[in-house]
Amino acid sequence: MYQANGYRPEKVCVVGAGPSGLIMARQLLRAGIPFDLYEKHSDVGGIWDPENPGSPMYNSAHFISSKHTSYFYGFPMPEHYPDYPSWRQLRDYIRSFARTYGLYEHITFNAPVETARLVDGEWRVTVAGNEHRYRALIAAPGVTWHPSRPNFPGLDTFRGEARHSVTYRHPDEFRHQRVLIVGGGNSGADIACDAARNADAAFFSVRRGYRYIPKHIFGVPLDVFVNEGGRPPAGVVVPEDPSALVDALVGDLTRYGLPAPDHDALASHPIVNTQIIHHLSHGDITAKPDVARFTPGGVVFADGSEEQIDLVIFATGYDYKVPFVDESVFEWRNRHPQLYLNVFNRQVDSLYVLGFIEFADAAYHRFDEMAQLVAIDLSVAGPEKTRFRHLKSSHYPDLRGSMQYIDSPRHANYVETHTYQHVLAEIREAFGWPAVDNAYFEALPTGLEPVLAGR
């Protein structure tokens, strides 16, 4: 890739062609920053393509945010899409986005990055045994590729099948089985519903009490109602406290055997699923407390009850990893890298990670705002570059506002979305860049009309 001594690369390396990597690529195009994007799979889409080895996607999966808020800026989802699109529709939408903005021509597919090393101020990136040089590295590896599986007492003696939810695909896997789903997050609740409809007997084990939030409030998608100041029907008084509102809509969860919520509604990642309440209320599935231990034939729970179990699905989350970069380059806490604004490596000026963040909001808009800050940092020079470098090393803004999130690894990188947006806006404005909105990319040539539009 280079021959002359003293050559300094101009290109930036982006790793990963899932949603966050594609969002980053479009920002780089708009900023006029040359880049290469490497993707280990054969097409774009990341987790939304279950053909990609290691994807956690299952047949019944749908977006938990609505199409009205969870879309790429300037590229709305098609009108014919439902409020909550399926994984197939998300996959097709993402590919249409990449075609429309000409991103495919910048991507090398079937190209897993083996290593990325910082040498003499530049990144040496090895792909298929070949080394390439770049001035910066932007990792967009996704957060649901490395399953976190618990190790309960007696699990090694269990004669049934026990596996992580990353392996689950279709409800037929539950037929003629007594199934236990461990984990009460969004995927755990989804998979528990599949088990309720298809297993001979289904059980749902959770460690703590959560609130299960409906996808529609008074017929309006949840995120639209919350973000656009939805109004209840005439004569209906809605509690101002979000916890009281959810409790009023869903009712007393202890009636179904679930533990009472032990935190405010906004203190945890929202579980946007009330189908599980439907199945619990119909006796299709039985709620259980945390697992105490396994036996050869089943499971003993924390309350002393015991069930014979054939199949256990651990919906117990994922670990954050950047597998192609030495872990020592990052500071880790609760298995999460500690990054400025959850994007910038504080010690290595040319290293960025996009997508390692959690908030109760639509992700794609926030990713675009984060990606814009990366583009700003890669664009500035002289005193402005020095100023941005100083921010990365010394600025520790409060990203949680007044929120107190539950103490768990899942919430280690959690931010309060409005507080976070305000901090990003302050930095963007300090460097004289406009806000990212639906008009921000209008000047960027697309070359193709959106393939999905009007279908």
Image (cartoon, rainbow, N blue to C red):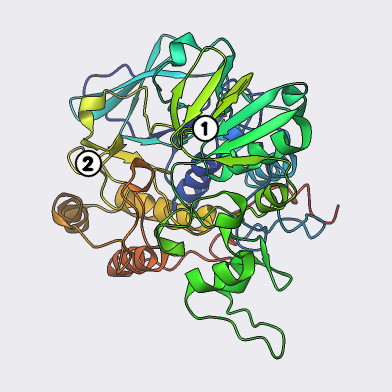
Q: Secondary structure at mark 1?
A: loop
Residue 43 or residue 244, whichever sits in front = 244
Q: Farthest residue toward the bottom?
A: 235
> Residue 52's spot in the image, x, y percent?
62, 24
> How far apart are the two marked residues, 1 and 2, measured between alpha carbons?
54 Å
Residue 119: name its quadrant: top left
**Is any atom of residue 202 visible in this view?**
yes
> Residue 424's spot in the image, x, y percent?
34, 63
Q: Secondary structure at mark 2?
A: loop
Residue at (23% x, 33% y) in the render: 330
Q: In the visual, does 277 lie left or right of 243?
A: right
Residue at (86% x, 52% y) in the render: 455
> Residue 389's spot in the image, x, y percent?
18, 50
Point out the tag, 1 or 2, that comes first from the N-terminus. 1
**Is any atom of residue 95 visible in this view?**
no
Disc 2 marks which amino acid? Asp
Residue 80 or residue 203, whichever sits in front = 203
Residue 258 or residue 370, whichever sits in front = 258
Q: Which mark is residue 305?
A: 1
Residue at (49% x, 32% y) in the render: 16
Residue topped by disc 2: 349
Disc 1 marks which amino acid? Ser
Dots 1 and 2: beta carbons under 8 Å?
no
Of marks 1 and 2, the one in the foreground:
1
Residue at (59% x, 72% y) in the render: 248
